[in-house]
Image: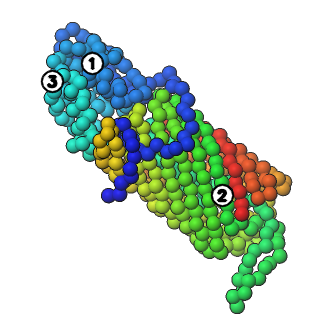
Amino acid sequence: MARWRCLASWPGAAVVFGGCLAGAGASAEDLFRIDASATSGPALNVSAGGSDLPDLLEDAVRSQGAFVGFVGRDTQATLDYAGLSNAIVVDVNAAGTSATLQIPGLGFSRGFSGSNRAELEDDIEAFLFEDGEQVYADFLELVRQQTVVDALDGNPTSVTGRLAHGAMRHHTLGPWRSFESAYVARVDEDGSTVEESPGPMFKGPNARGWINVTGTEIDGESFDGQRYAVDTFGEMLGSTVGFTFAGFAAYQELEGSEMFQGGLELGVPIRLLRDHEVIEGVLLEVRAVPMVQLGAAGSVDTGSGGSLWGYGGAITARLMTETLTFSAGVQSLWYEGLGFDAEYDGQGYSFDTELDQHVLSAGGSVGWRPVEWLMLDAGYAYHDYREPAGVSYWGSPSAGASAVLGGATLRVGYEADLAERVDTQSLSFGLHVEF
């Protein structure tokens, strides 16, 4: 199994991509909560929440911090993981010499023994890093399927969600190239190149690229957050076949829990129909775009992360006039987890990512150039997770305005992700250059 190398301080944390923006302050809600109760002696119940899952679990098992009152008491601690109740249950005896770890969603239970609570906590942690790595990988898969906070999969702001939507934007939705008249090189039957006179219709450049900066507000069922991302895209086109490259790096904060993401995409656009004149002044272009993708996410605070690769393709069509372009496309992408290596306290560990996802997408957009220096665009994409996920499907409307400055375009755009359990709203600024 292929593996990526990363440095982390908790199972599942992946590559921390450089250049991520600084995070915002924590919100009033807590992403995680532990409800602890004494199972012997006088009644004692304590609930404590936080944004750092490893620290919260450590306090509960060691009876410290908010749980100091459980020293010398039989204790049961139950974790609510971002709305997933009874995610983990830990029972510790009064002497602090034995504990039972349960993951009810997996039907998993295991006992531990030690000389004190601190040793018990260390033994549980060591188990999750070593012999229990598959159990922990299965637990993270459960989190991705039943919550909407995972950074890797299962929701619109996860890596699979961003890779799928990014591919739709790259190959179907835009941003728009300028509607410039251009000489188009044609090859005659005898192999000689013929230069045609410029016409009033859209002729795309041979190469283009853009860089985009996006800020996003996230509104979940019981949490809020922010996401900041930088993404790039480049395309080189020949008469029939081309090459595309895209990448993104993102920082996300949910109720004080920090997450990091990144992804890459390579595509091969193939022009099935190029500049076909449907009627005078109206051109049609049809493309097939096979592609491969890589992605990773990690968070020390949520104790989660992983890496993946994806493959699939899109079919897109554009109908173009001098001032209008209509675009539509369908897309299918499959994602599989990759193993990766992590380093914790100076020791190296290997982890697997339990992930098997399929995302179907469809969408369209329209671009209008009312005057020489201005372009307006609007679009909509629909995405559907075909395998179990925290969000089954979502829609992404978008709109933008661009100032055309010769071969460069400055764009301001708005976009939203609308799902049953989480919504987002984004504002983006981009520079688009044609060659």
Q: Position of residue 72 (x, y in %)?
A: 19, 14
Residue 404 in sight from this viewpoint: yes
Name above or below for residue 278 compared with residue 194.
above
Task: Tell whether 310 sits left or right of 314.
Answer: left
Q: How is the image coloured?
A: rainbow
Locate residue 320, reporting x and y percent: 73, 64
Could you give the CA–CA distance between mark 2 and mark 1, rounded to whole angstroms? 55 Å
C-alpha span from label 2 to label 3: 61 Å
The residue tagged 2 is: 209
The amino acid at mark 2 is Gly
Q: Secondary structure at mark 2?
A: strand
Closer to the camera, 401 or 205?
205
In 3D space, how far apart are the residues under numbered discs 1 and 3 (Cα atoms)?
A: 15 Å
Task: Pick the residue in front: 89 or 19.
Answer: 19
Where residue 278 sits, quadrant-wise, is: bottom right
- What is the count of numbered marks? 3
As helix, strand or loop, the secondary structure at mark 1 comes to: loop
Question: Is 121 located above or below residue 315 in the figure?
Answer: above
Numbered circle sitting on residue 63: 1
Q: Earlier in the sequence, mark 2 or mark 1?
A: 1
What residue appears at the point 67 percent right and 64 percent down from the top-left corner? 207
Q: Amino acid at mark 1?
A: Ser
Q: Which residue is mark 3?
A: 115
